[in-house]
């Protein structure tokens, strides 16, 4: 059976925000480690922009090297998700095995928060794609509620919310989890038994 990496987008891999006024401001940014991560998103009549999180390429290299399947599962709407995947994955040489969006999530009422939330139950993934090992599947996501049906498969990534003031500041979360994948996941037969202690 195949191993699988399921990757969230917003606040895990990217932060999307701003309007056209902010874009004109940030276009003048001259620090290479910031400008190299800028992305713009266009769908329908909307224009949005944001940044890739630092070390997204290193993280994706680790996933593609050590998982049989690498896919995206976001609670964003389809056109938005496809635009981000193009910028963060495809344009940089990474082709997801599947791209799931809000329509693939399960909407439910969360009593603790009193809110409607969108969950990502891995049983749905196993049933639709088939031949995936539940013991060798990881869901990389900053939202604990979205993954609460599969806590042992969930790698809780610290949420990343870069802004205009901190655009240039490095964040090492994806680099750290990349090293964890290479050092721990690569040699494990049951990812549910792995500890994240000390990773972040």
Image (cartoon, rainbow, N blue to C red):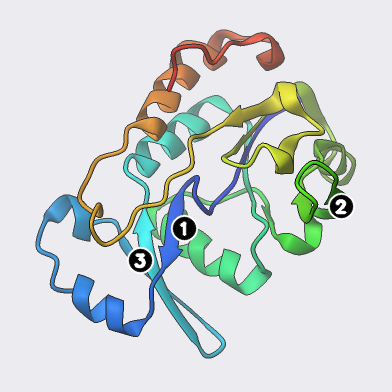
Residue shown at 20%/60% (left/top)? Answer: 35
Q: Secondary structure beneath disc 2?
A: strand
- Could you tell me which residue is drawn at 45 percent across and 26 percent down? 177
Occupied quadrant, residue 134: top right
Side (left or right) of 101 relative to 167: right
What mark, if any, has residue 58 been given in the picture? none
What residue does disc 3 label? Answer: 39
Which x, y percent locates residue 72?
62, 49
Please tell me which residue lies in front, 175 or 165. 165
Q: What crowding class fits label 1: few (fewer than 14 Cα within 10 Å), some (14-19), or many (20 or more)?
A: some
Q: Which mark is first along the chain, 3 or 2?
A: 3
Residue labelled with disc 1: 90
Cα–Cα gap, marks 1 and 2: 34 Å
Disc 1 and disc 3 in contact, CB within 8 angstroms:
no
Q: Is residue 181 above or below residue 33?
A: above
Q: Residues within 10 Å of mark 3 (few under 14, many from 20)?
A: some
Q: Nearer the viewer, mark 1 or mark 2?
A: 2
- Distance from label 1 to label 3 (Cα)? 13 Å
Q: Nearer the viewer, mark 1 or mark 3?
A: 3
43 lies above or below 67: below
SS for tag 3? strand
Name the residue located 59 percent from the left edge and 47 percent from the top edge: 8
Outermost residue on the left side: it is 30
Q: In the picture shown, does residue 164 fall above or below 80?
A: above
Residue 115 coordinates in the image, percent (x, y):
78, 55
23 vs 68, nearest the viewer: 23
Specify the farthest residue to the right.
Answer: 127
Q: Are marks 2 and 3 in contact (CB under 8 Å)?
A: no
SS for callout 1: helix
Q: Is residue 187 left or right of residue 39?
A: right
Q: Which residue is mark 2?
A: 109
Q: Earlier in the sequence, mark 1 or mark 2?
A: 1
């Amino acid at each position: 059976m195949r191993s699988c990496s399921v990757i969230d987008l917003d606040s895990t891999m990217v932060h999307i925000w701003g309007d056209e006024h902010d874009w004109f401001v940030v276009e003048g940014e001259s620090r290479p480690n910031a400008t190299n991560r800028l992305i713009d998103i266009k769908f329908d009549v909307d224009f949005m922009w944001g940044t890739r999180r630092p070390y997204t390429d290193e993280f994706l290299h680790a996933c593609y090297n050590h998982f049989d399947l690498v896919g995206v599962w976001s609670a964003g709407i389809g056109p938005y998700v496809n635009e981000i995947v193009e910028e963060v994955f495809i344009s940089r040489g990474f082709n997801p095995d599947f791209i799931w969006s809000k329509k693939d999530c399960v909407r439910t009422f969360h009593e603790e928060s009193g809110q409607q939330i969108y969950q990502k139950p891995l049983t749905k993934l196993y049933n639709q794609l088939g031949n995936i090992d539940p013991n060798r599947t990881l869901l990389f996501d900053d939202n604990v509620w979205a993954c609460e049906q599969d806590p042992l498969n969930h790698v809780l990534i610290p949420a990343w919310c870069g802004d205009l003031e901190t655009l240039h500041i490095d964040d090492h979360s994806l680099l750290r989890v990349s090293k964890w994948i290479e050092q721990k996941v690569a040699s494990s037969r049951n990812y549910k038994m792995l500890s994240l202690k000390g990773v972040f």
